[in-house]
Amino acid sequence: MLVLGIETSCDETAAALVTDEREIRANVVLSQLDQHAPYGGVVPEIAARSHIEHLDGVIAHAMREAGAEFTDLDAVAATAGPGLIGAVMVGLMTGKAVAGVHNLPFAAVNHLEGHALSARLTNEGLQFPYLLLLVSGGHCQFLAVECVARYRRLGTTIDDAAGEAFDKAAKLLGLGYPGGPAVEHAALNGDPARFDLPRPLKGRVGSDFSFSGLKTALLHKVQAIQGSLGDQDRADLAASFQAAVTDVVIDRGRNAIRQFQTDHPKGRALVAAGGVAANSMLRTRLKSLANEMSMTLSVPPLALCTDNAAMIAWAGIERLSLGLTDTLDAAPRARWPLDMDAPRPPGAGRAGRLGPKA
Ligand code: KG4
Ligand code: ZN
């Protein structure tokens, strides 16, 4: 089965061709970074317009690279949400058009399901159930992946996502956009112990996250030395910030694993996905945590951690193989939780209400 995957939910215009034998025949990602960088974040209208302008060319590029014609396709999969609604619509409509014209089965894929299943594209032995840490610019959660289309959320952020926190920290430090890679790079020369930053929710029961207090604490440190903020200060602040985020994720992760092992005594795999999973300090610490808890860690290669269309094509393959097809009236969705039954998180500023200290 050869599937065309299309991804346009945020600021990457992407198309990929993937087979059900796990061969990635093309994986083209066109980043809109340059267009959003002057604003320090993604501007939804610019994103949507840029997808319109570039998507056809990106698909043509992927088809050429794979040596495929539209007539070789067996199905089309496109991201239908969650994401910036105008941006999602561009890829979804294009996917529907290709499927409609060539009379192909269509999968309207949840972007988060793409991240959730991406590890199975490169790791054939990865069996359900597994525990997923999904850490990106818009999401920060632990999910028990029980099988395709069945997810249970164990914990989530009550305010910012981890990637968003990295992006805001980079902005405060004047390190540019996107923040994650910039902070990681600056932290290479920094002392993580120089600044004492908080570890929000560390030691509390459960596996929810909160990052807004950490961001504010960083702002206060920056303000305290403003005017004389030098490169070494920036490096030390970046390193201290990265260490704080990582500490929190590991602490929350330990609780999430305990919960997962209770619910799924046979589940032994921890998977990290999403852009922040590209962070090498986080990867190293997650590996130690997995060892400590008798789990194995599986992280997709970097190119499949950040947004891409190969993961969308693969999620489409997984769904279509189970007979889960969508009709061409599938709606684009700005909000689309993977676990529809999960309660809404308590909300920003309510960290104190999340229960007693463990
Ligand atoms: O999954 P992704 O490509 O897009 C979505 O948000 O869906 O994730 C992008 C996020 C950004 O916030 C970016 O700053 C963060 O992932 N990121 C990183 C690293 N690379 C990307 N954060 C920390 N360290 C990195 N090396
Ligand atoms: Zn993503």
Image: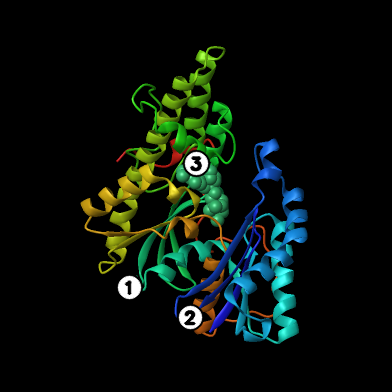
Using the image as rendered, state which of residue 207 and residue 226 is in the foreground. Answer: 226
Location of residue 103 in the rendering, given as x and y in whole percent from the top left corner: 70, 87
Q: Which residue is mark 3?
A: 181
Q: Which residue is mark 1?
A: 125
Spatial distance from mark 1 to mark 2, Cα to Cα? 15 Å
Classify 10 Å Cα crowding around label 3: few (below 14), some (14-19), many (20 and above): some
Q: Is mark 2 within 8 Å of ligand 2?
A: no
* Dot in front, 3 or 1: 3
- Vertical relation: 113 (above or below) 156: below
Dot 3 and dot 1 residues touching (CB under 8 Å): no
Instruction: Please tell me which residue lies in front, 6 or 143.
Output: 6
Mark 3, secondary structure of its residue: helix
Element type at marker 1?
loop
Q: Is residue 102 left or right of residue 73?
A: right
Q: SS at mark 2?
A: loop
- Characterize the local packing of mark 1: few (<14), some (14-19) or many (20 or more) Cα atoms within 10 angstroms: few
- Quarter occupied by residue 64: bottom right
Query: Looking at mark 3, is its residue's CB closer than 8 Å to ligand 1?
Result: yes
- The residue carrying mark 2 is 20
- Which quadrant of the rendered structure holds the C terminus? top left
Mark 3–mark 1 Cα distance, whole angstroms, equals 30 Å
The image position of residue 316, as x and y in percent, is 55, 75
Contact, mark 1 vs mark 2 (Cβ under 8 Å): no
**Quick one: 261 or 139, which is closer to the camera?**
139
Tell me the amino acid under the disc marked 2: Asp
